[in-house]
Image (cartoon, helix red, strand yellow):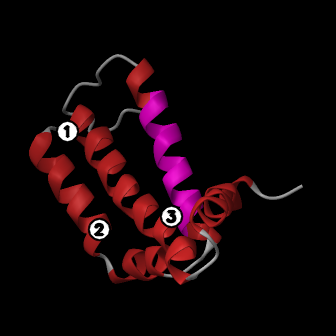
């Protein structure tokens, strides 16, 4: 059984043929999605400016840029974790801004 992180790259390769673009495009899209999901999650808890700073920090951090630039499973996993955190934070009532965290203690 294949890891779920490789399913997106496999789908791109089957749809568009196997070449460097179809292998790396899902990584780039996951990087954009991860920054957007981080923005939405932090915005819900700490406001739009904090969300913008968090999303921009993820998008511009050299380590994250390298993760999403090459064909690694870590980048896809980070996108999956972002979806999970946003889904869990969406189901919880808004946390007071003084706590700065959407997780219950």
Q: Nearer the viewer, residue 96 or 58?
A: 58
Mark in front: 1 vs 3: 3
Q: Is residue 85 magenta?
A: yes
Asked whether disc 1 touches disc 2, contact meaning CB atoms under 8 Å apart, the reply is: no
Disc on the earlier residue, 1 or 2 = 1
Mark in front: 1 vs 2: 2
Q: Which residue is at 83% across, 58% downward?
A: 2
Magenta segment range?
75-88
Q: Is residue 105 magenta?
A: no
Q: How crowded is mark 2: few (under 14 residues within 10 Å), some or many (20 or more)?
A: many
Q: Can residue 104 be seen at all in this image of the molecule?
A: no
> Where residue 8 sits in the image (x, y, percent)?
61, 56
102 relative position to 20: left or right: left
Q: Which of 72 and 25 is in front in this view?
A: 25
Q: Give the Cα distance between marks 1 and 3.
A: 29 Å
Q: How crowded is mark 1: few (under 14 residues within 10 Å), some or many (20 or more)?
A: some
**Mark 1 element type:** helix
Q: Report the number of numbered marks.
A: 3
Q: Label 2 belongs to which residue?
A: 59
Q: Label 1 belongs to which residue?
A: 46
19 relative position to 44: left or right: right
**Mark 2 element type:** helix
36 relative position to 79: left or right: left
Q: Label 3 belongs to which residue?
A: 26
Q: Which residue is at 25% across, 32% downward?
A: 44
Q: What residue occupies the far left of the structure in this picture?
A: 49
Q: Give the Cα distance between marks 2 and 3.
A: 15 Å
**Rendering quarter of residue 53:** bottom left
């Amino acid at each position: 059984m294949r890891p779920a992180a490789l399913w997106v790259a496999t789908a791109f390769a089957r749809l568009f043929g196997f070449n460097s673009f179809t292998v790396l495009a899902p990584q780039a899209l996951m990087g954009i999605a991860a920054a957007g999901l981080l923005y939405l999650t932090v915005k819900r808890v700490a406001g739009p400016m904090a969300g913008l700073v968090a999303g921009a920090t993820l998008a511009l951090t050299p380590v994250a840029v390298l993760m999403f630039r090459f064909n690694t499973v870590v980048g896809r996993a980070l996108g999956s974790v972002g979806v999970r955190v946003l889904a869990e934070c969406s189901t919880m009532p808004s946390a007071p801004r003084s706590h700065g965290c959407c997780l219950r203690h």
